[in-house]
Image: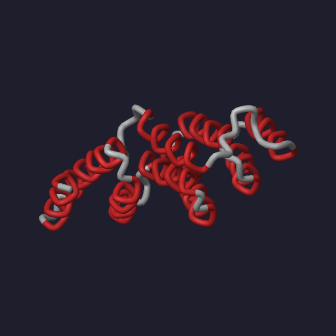
């Protein structure tokens, strides 16, 4: 909460860069404390300030996947891919998307990820994900909602790229 407030104060003071840093730290703290919805709220606030925040878009996507919010996940997937292409971070994003597809039980999401991987020039991974849509998912698919809800935020915190 203090990091979120510090971000708000920095933003009100006209220091967007400092606000982004505080918001990023707040997201990480909320995720570590398993406060997923608080993390989501701050992440959405950060995206409003900086729409090209690739890591934050990825975090939102992980949170959507874990909460099984498919409509929102598909929107965030589109935004994530567009931002990644603009800032040329295709390799990092490709790995994240492939990891999401590996554990996702939703066929619609897998199809969208495969299309996203194609857009990132990751044809081999896209082909593998499409194969999972034709079966019951990857060998590592997580069907249990509570396990998925825990695994996704943990995956979001594992990335060690800067929150931008």
Q: Please state which of residues 109 and 48 is positioned toward the viewer in this rendering.
A: 109
Quadrant of the rendered image containing residue 69: bottom right
Structure colour scheme: secondary structure
Left or right, 20 with reference to 125: left
Left or right, 33 with reference to 8: right
At 57% from the left and 45% from the top, the residue drawn is 148
Instruction: Provide residue 140's location: percent of width, then percent of height.
Output: 69, 33
Q: Name, please, the residue furthest toward the right.
A: 134
The tally of labels here is 0
Left or right, 128 with reference to 97: right
Where 50 sits versus 87, above or below?
Answer: below
At 16% from the left and 67% from the top, the residue drawn is 12
Instruction: Provide residue 100's location: percent of width, then percent of height.
Output: 61, 42
Instruction: Provide residue 159's location: percent of width, then percent of height.
Output: 44, 34
Image quarter of the N terminus: bottom left
At 35% from the left and 52% from the top, the residue drawn is 35
Where 91 sits versus 64, above or below?
Answer: above
At 73% from the left and 44% from the top, the residue drawn is 118
């Amino acid at each position: 909460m203090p990091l979120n407030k510090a971000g708000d104060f920095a933003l009100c003071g006209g220091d967007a860069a400092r606000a982004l840093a505080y918001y990023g730290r707040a997201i990480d703290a909320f995720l570590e404390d398993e406060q997923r919805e608080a993390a989501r709220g701050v992440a959405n606030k950060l995206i409003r300030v900086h729409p090209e925040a690739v890591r934050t878009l990825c975090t939102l996507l992980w949170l959507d996947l874990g909460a099984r919010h498919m409509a929102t996940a598909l929107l965030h997937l589109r935004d994530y891919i567009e931002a990644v292409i603009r800032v040329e971070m295709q390799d990092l994003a490709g790995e994240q998307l492939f990891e999401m597809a590996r554990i996702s039980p939703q066929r619609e999401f897998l199809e969208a990820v495969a299309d996203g991987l194609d857009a990132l020039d990751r044809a081999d991974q896209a082909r593998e994900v499409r194969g999972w849509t034709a079966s019951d998912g990857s060998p590592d698919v997580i069907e249990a909602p509570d396990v998925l809800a825990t695994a996704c935020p943990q995956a979001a915190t594992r990335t060690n790229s800067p929150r931008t």
